[in-house]
Image: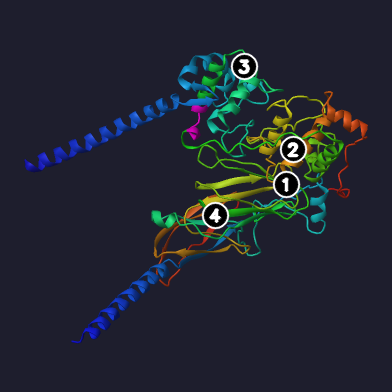
Amino acid sequence: MRRMMLSGSLALTALAVVALCSLSWAQMTEADENQRLGMESHIGKLTGHAAAAQGDYRRFCVGCHGVLGDGEGENAQWIDPKPRNFTLGIFKCRSTTTGTLPLDSDLYDTIGRGLDSSNMPSWNPLSSQQRADLVAYVKHFSARWVTEKPGEPIKIPPKPEITAERIKAGQAVFQKVECWKCHGQTGSGNGPSAATLTDDQNRPIQPYNFHDNNRFKCGTTDEDLYRIFMTGLDGTPMPSWSDNIKPDEAWDLVFYLRSLQPMKSREKEIARQVGLKPGAPSATPAPAPQQ
Amino acid sequence: MKAHYKVAGITAMLLVLAFSLLLSTRNVSAAANGTITGTVKLDGAAPHMKGIDMSKDPFCVKQHENSPAHLENVIVGPGGGLQNVVLYISEGLSGAETSQVPAQEPVFDQKNCMYTPHVLAMDVNQKFKVTTSDQTTHNIHPLPNALAGNIPWNKSQPPGAPPIETSWKTEEIAISVKCNIHPWMHGYFVVVKGPYATSDEKGSYTIENVPAGNYTVTAWQEEYGTQTQKVTVAAGKPGTADFTFKAK
């Protein structure tokens, strides 16, 4: 009799433990989700709330970026480049170092500006509060924002005066670090390595074509251009150059790159005046391919 | 008894106590000097490793004028020894033992448009360096699984670039590494916990600094996957584990 009571109470205890554990596990999952829907964004004086953006996301974003924010919306199969997968926390347009989370303002600017030469439109017609809420919602898809702080934003020194010396120095940087390997000697995106480039998901991707484009995916200004090559475009072949190009040299490179673009600019004018020509690669000619 | 004899006696006892404590700690670290050794072989015909067409970069072509480059997925020595297999202890180490990080900083070099070594093993949080010995620009682009803890990054390495010193925060077997500029360049970072080793050109390895105990050793090869074996390490008696992967 006592033995039966003992085994009975043991069984009850085991059952209670299991029940408590499953209850707390269920609560943890729900708590996790609630915590993430409580994600906030801070852009200047604006505070965005993820929970407030659910309606807007479902109306405007789900078609490409998917219900789970993984870039697998219905439209994704028809478009190239593919929509961003927010669950990874990896973004092209950042003011922070490679391998780190962007600032809230980076995401806010991207949503507002859209991404040139892609299917991501400008969402400026939405109010600033709506866009701030959407930033928080984008963040809530990845647990990285719960534990990880955004990276250190790069410091951009004030833009110096555009001079012929600086544009020529910029061309020297372009040659020395071999941007032309992907971007080509005229910056037309036709360098020797361009044809085999793939992104982090092994999908073919093309390098930026300076010859035919005025704007960038990650901005339009000289400061944006500076930031793009110094922080690199995470998720793509474009690396970060801040370890190998000094800030002053970086401005020289910005001016040289501007001289390659089609729009009328001071840089283009000066380059024409000094008769700047695309430099040829300095390496010796290649022998026949090895078998 | 005279007072100074007492003092002398107590001092002597304290000294003996101190020395024996010192000696006992030395004994504890001596116990962590066991090893696991062995050989990894490939059973069957070694697969043909394709030659690499480097014609898109004249510098790379020149470096291989006299020694054409081949892919390095499977490197088999004359005796059938498999190189670049990573051996590590997957079971049996205590939490404290797995969180110890060696002070050495292994180096991953970009040399002659190939990665040297092809596979670099390291511990979680162990610092390692990426260097370039080439007169052509590379970018170093590790691709860990961003959902599992380690985050991908992508940095340029033009000629003369300073070394990149970094580490990984999560175990990952293994992180694929590539250069976007030279699409044939592939390597691996293998991030483990606890002592590890990589097999040499004969397929031989020795895992050092293993305390006495019973363990499971895992061998990882990039094409053939993993195999495990149970090993016992005793004081003065190294453990041995030989592995044989079957050619496909």
Depth order, front residue of A237/A128: A128
Lower sequence index among marks 4 and 1: 4
> Which quadrant of the view contains residue A63?
top right
Circle 1 packing at 10 Å, graded few (<14), some (14-19), many (20+), is many
Circle 3 packing at 10 Å, graded few (<14), some (14-19), many (20+), is some
Q: Amino acid at mark 2?
A: Thr
Secondary structure at badge 3 equals loop
- The percent position of residue B164, horizontal first and vertical second, equals 64, 50
Left or right: B126 with respect to A214? Answer: left
Picture layout, residue B81 above or below residue B165:
below
Picture layout, residue B178 above or below residue B132:
above
Q: Which residues are magenta?
A: A138-145
Q: Which residue was labeled with disc 2? A: A196
In front: label 3 or label 2: 3
How many angstroms separate mark 2 from mark 4 (CA)? Answer: 30 Å
Q: Is residue B108 visible?
A: yes
Secondary structure at badge 1 equals strand
- The percent position of residue B154, horizontal first and vertical second, equals 65, 41
Q: Quadrant of the N terminus of chain B?
A: bottom left
Q: Which residue was labeled with disc 4? A: B122
- The percent position of residue A138, horizontal first and vertical second, equals 53, 25
Marks 4 & 1 on one chain = yes
Left or right: B15 with respect to B161? Answer: left
